[in-house]
Amino acid sequence: MADSRKYITSEELKNHNKPGDLWISIQGKVYDVSNWVKEHPGGDFPLLNLAGQDVTDAFVAFHPATAWQYLDKFFKGFYLNDYSASEVSKDYRRLVSDFTKMGLFEKKGHVCLFTMCLMAMLFSLSVYGILCCQSLLAHLISGGLMGCLWIQSGWIGHDSGHYQVMSTRGFNRFAQVLTGNCLAGISIAWWKWNHNAHHIACNSLEYDPDLQHMPFFAVSSKFFDSLTSYFYDRKMNFDSFTRFLISHQHWTFYPVMCFARINLFAQSFILLLSNKNVPHRVQELFGVVSFWIWYPLLVSCLPNWGERIMFVLASFTVTGIQHVQFCLNHFSSEIYVAPPKGNDWFEKQTNGSLDISCPSWMDWFHGGLQFQIEHHLFPRLPRCQLRKVSPFVKDLCKNHGLPYSCVSFWKSNVLTISTLRAAALQARDLTKPVPKNLVGKPSTLTVETEELKEIHGIISS
């Protein structure tokens, strides 16, 4: 029988990649998601930046099997006549299928329960130390405990944004707002908007917000070209002031991380007060405002301004550990200057991520980030399953000649500082003008100094 299907080519599909005209392909079937972009739970960034290409691997990574049944309403009636999947993608999809059959995506363990109990204990001890103790040391410890509470709230917020940590969606939403907005002052809506973009465009200098920290940090001299952030929709100017800050970034990294939380507070309000489409905006604002009521009131219960400042500094400094952890997994990994693509999903996630080796009893400290490669490949996988799937990912990388980078926590810090130092030294060299017209040339996709080459070589080994 003659094939009655209607076909288009990949080149024709590429033409449908603009707002109002967004087509994607999943396993060779073409879908029109132009109107869905406003309702997409993962935000508009994934659809806007992956439209016009096959996105099967990204779809498989972020959506459960039940999501397939909803695709038909977006089907355009077209198929890709040149659709194909690489051997890496085939093996990756096979792993996702195997993990699904094993029930790993549904076996969440009791991590959330233990974390919530720990948070309740930390909060109670911190409040008790302020209200019921008079010693300076007790108040200092209380500030540190508050910082530990915020770290654990970050892990819950991270997990609940990727998969359902509670029994129902309603309870999951409650856990998000309670632990993120109310207890930590950070909007879960902002986090999901930011974090989904990071996953989609892992280590793209122009599209990954987790690498866009100008004027304070630049992980590559490619930033010296004043790249455009397509996430924040602004140019990241490399001016004389930025050059000064970047040239000292390997010294300022840890001090800045102690106060990185301020940026998260600011970004939360910027999003919630913007004209962007923010789901549950009122609920989000109520949660964040509640934090800015109870936290200052608690601080005001301390006897003098010296102890109040000490408490705030202690809580911020301890939480700085988590902000350092966020950077370790990507700052020293491979970067690129280009939009994200759908046909090299596995490669980009493995090349742009770094695992941190640690014993299982230290998993609570890393919150799942120690298995960053596994997490980026299987973002819906509960963190209690990441250690179990690690050997499968290692084998797949080995079979296809792809890097599987894993170092100790100490080594990851060394690599991060070395990467920042290499870029700082290039920024410090005032005898060399800022490079021009490098973006887009093949040479910019390679590391620009022998020192950085050596660093990346250490990671790969």
Image (cartoon, grey):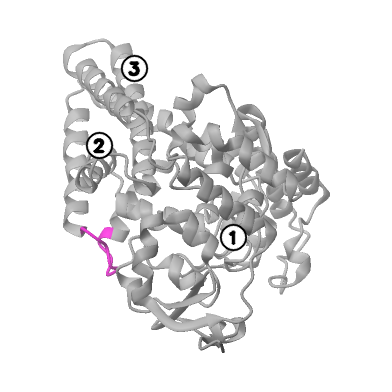
Circles 3, 2 touching at the beta carbon (< 8 Å): no
One can see residue 367 in this view: no
Q: Residues within 10 Å of mark 2 (few under 14, many from 20)?
A: many
Question: In the image, residue 243 lies at what x, y percent?
Answer: 62, 56
Of the residues shown, which amino acid type is indicated by label 3?
Answer: Ile
Question: Which residues make up the magenta segment?
Answer: 272-280
With 205 as the anchor, is 288 left or right in this view?
left
Give the residue number, with chain letter if any, for mark 1. Answer: 204
With 289 as the anchor, is 439 left or right in this view?
right
Among all residues in the image, which is located at the extreme right?
450
- The circle drawn on residue 183 is 2
Of the residues shown, which amino acid type is indicated by label 1?
Answer: Ser
Of the residues shown, which amino acid type is indicated by label 2?
Answer: Leu
- The circle drawn on residue 141 is 3
- Residue located at (58% from left, 52% from top): 94
Q: Earlier in the sequence, mark 1 or mark 3?
A: 3
- Residue located at (73% from left, 67% from top): 435
Task: Answer above or below: position of 251 versus 445.
Answer: above
- Magenta stretch contains residue 273: yes
Helix, strand, or loop for circle 2?
helix
Spatial CA span between label 3 and label 2: 18 Å
